[in-house]
Amino acid sequence: MARMSSISAKRSTIAAPAKRLAAGFTLTETLLALAILVIMAGIVTMGIPVAFDTYAKSVDTSNAQVLLSTTTTSLRDELGMATDVQTSGGTLYFVSGEGYWASISNDAAPGAGKGLKKHVYKGADADSLTEETSQNLIPDAAITDTLGISCSSIAYADGVFTVKDLKVENAKGQTLASQDEFKIRAIMLEEGR
């Protein structure tokens, strides 16, 4: 009988853990699962703004490259077809392919959204010009509220226009795309010589 009571005692100790497992999680296990969920939620919550910032930066950089390319194409179209060039008062004037006097300058508005302006004039030569209209060189759709484009100078010598420090900046003034110097051959001026 003593042997029977020891066997039934062993059975009761073996059966006890099985009942505990069937009852559910212990308090420690539940707290550990909650802690893991809170940590995971914190990581996801902190990662979302970083992902949005990275995405916004990559979109701005891509748009800046497109804007720089669009600007160089527009400058090539305008300056490459010039038929006459004169400088007066530090401003470079050219006769566009359409036959009117024009100049290109930076937009006076600072910051993002600025661009290069094309000024159209009436007059016979650079010393007697009066401004008729002013328009953006690049279409408004290409310049966003977050990006702007400018250059430090446009010069002409020996049949070649030289555009210096063409750069695209964001609203914070950071340069996202730039071209230090590029040259545009004035095809119509060369043919006229």
Image (cartoon, helix red, strand yellow):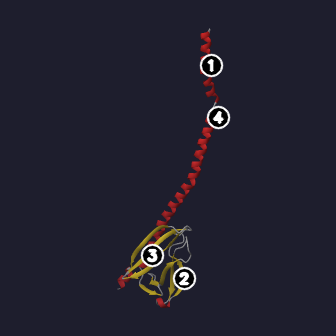
Q: Mark 1 points at which residue?
A: 12
Q: In which quarter of the image is the N terminus?
A: top right
Number of other residues with Cα within 10 Å of mark 4, as a class: few under 14, some 14 to 19, many 20 or more: few
Task: Please state which of the two labelled residues, at mark 3 or mark 1, is closer to the viewer.
Answer: 1
Residue type highlighted by circle 1: Ser
Q: Name the residue under label 2.
A: 133
- Whether residue 8 is visible, yes or no, is yes
In terms of sequence position, does the residue under pointer 1 or pointer 4 come before the other?
1
As helix, strand or loop, the secondary structure at mark 2 comes to strand
Q: How far apart are marks 3 and 1 (CA)?
A: 92 Å
- Residue 43, x across and y down, in percent: 57, 48
The picture quadrant where one finds residue 114 is bottom right
In terms of sequence position, does the residue under pointer 2 or pointer 3 come before the other?
3
Going 62% across and 16% down the picture, which residue do you hit?
9
Question: Do residues under tags 1 and 2 come within 8 Å of each other at their CB atoms?
Answer: no
Residue 75's disc number: 3
Q: Name the residue under label 4.
A: 27
Q: Toward the viewer: 95 or 147?
A: 147
The picture quadrant where one finds residue 50 is bottom right
Task: Please state which of the two labelled residues, at mark 4 or mark 3, is closer to the viewer.
Answer: 4
Question: Do residues under tags 4 and 3 come within 8 Å of each other at their CB atoms?
Answer: no
